[in-house]
Image (cartoon, rainbow, N blue to C red):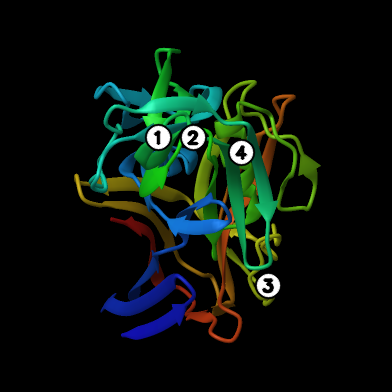
Amino acid sequence: MMRIDLDNVEILRRKIGIKKELIDINIRKSLAGLWAINGILYKNRLLKNYYELIYTLLGGGTITCVDTTGYGRNFNAEQYKITYDRCQIHVGTDTEDLPFNGHVLTSYGASVADTVEALAQEDYSETVVGGTAPKNGSIVGICGRLNDSTNHMRTILLNDVLLSVSSGDPLSIHLKFYEPWVYNIAVVWRGWLEYSNPTGTKDIAGVNYQLRCSGGITVGEDFEIALGDGTEAWSPTDYTLTNARIIDTIRRIFESDSGIEILLRAWYIPAEDESIPELGLIGKLYDVGGSKYDTLLARIALETNPISLTANHLYIIRMKILAT
């Protein structure tokens, strides 16, 4: 058994047979959210609906989110446009946090967000939604106005935090993406929440393109595990894997009312001994003209702890995104 601990990433490897090894990559606490009021930040909980949408972004196919009316609605980022209208800020009267599978605030009022932007900071990226409280209340949340598989708009609650607000208070929600996620994912969420075709995405060759979100389907092909040779430290604005080798990957989601595990699994047999200093997730996203671009969403930089692989051995690589 070998273990490597990085920021938000744990790597475990163990032999499971002759010339066969399992490499588990567990990603935790890399997706976060904060509400801000009067310059004070409050940590909030990302709900099950949010992680369902992360799964379909990665190419997981059709997922079900529960809308504010309590009905399950199907979404698929490779088959349908996801965004339908600009997102909303909801304020309700609940006095306890919603459960992980919560989908609506009690007696809520809604206001359309004023601004949505994507920002790259020094050690994370974020999508920031700004607006005002529509009523007095004790709990706030952000709702996407999303397009389901029947081409109807559904209101989908993504997070909540207990926070006493008054009507007209300025509010902002920061959806944060820490290592290993890169800035491209913040741009996707800007497009989905703003109902726009945002600029700022870069492909793995460093080419800028305008992402298609409001104009049509966003995801062109599934995101897959990739191996690279780069030794640079992780950065939210590093969009490349050196000499990327993309591996066929399957995706699964395991879910309950209290937690989710998004699993990406790949099998790899190196033809010669290798030392792997970086891994990532690469897929294809559409630009506004309908062209597809190979795009990096996450990069794990191992730097001084590369993974050594032996020629002709089978390696099962399991990348897990965990949330409760």
Q: Marks 3/1: CA distance?
A: 51 Å
- Residue 229: name its quadrant: bottom right
Pick whichever of labels 1 and 4 is earlier in the sequence: 1
Q: Nearer the viewer, mark 3 or mark 1?
A: 1
Which residue lies at the image location 40% right of the left edge and 75% below the top edge? 11
Q: Are marks 4 and 2 in contact (CB under 8 Å)?
A: no
Which mark is in front, 4 or 2?
2
Disc 1, disc 2: CB below 8 Å?
yes
Counting residues from the N terminus, which is met first, the one under dot 4 or under dot 2?
A: 2
Tag shown at residue 190:
4
Q: Earlier in the sequence, mark 3 or mark 4?
A: 4
Kind of residue indicated by mark 4 = Arg
For the residues bearing labels 3 and 1, Cβ distance under 8 angstroms: no
Q: In terms of secondary structure, where does tag 3 sit?
A: loop
Q: Which residue is mark 3?
A: 230
Q: Earlier in the sequence, mark 3 or mark 1?
A: 1
* Residue tagged 2: 133
Image quadrant holding the N terminus, namely: bottom left
Please indicate whether residue 48 sits to the left or right of residue 119 in the image. Answer: left
Q: Which mark is residue 136?
A: 1
Mark 1–mark 4 Cα distance, whole angstroms, equals: 27 Å
Which residue is located at x 64 percent, y 48 percent? Answer: 184
Disc 3 from disc 2: Cα separation = 46 Å
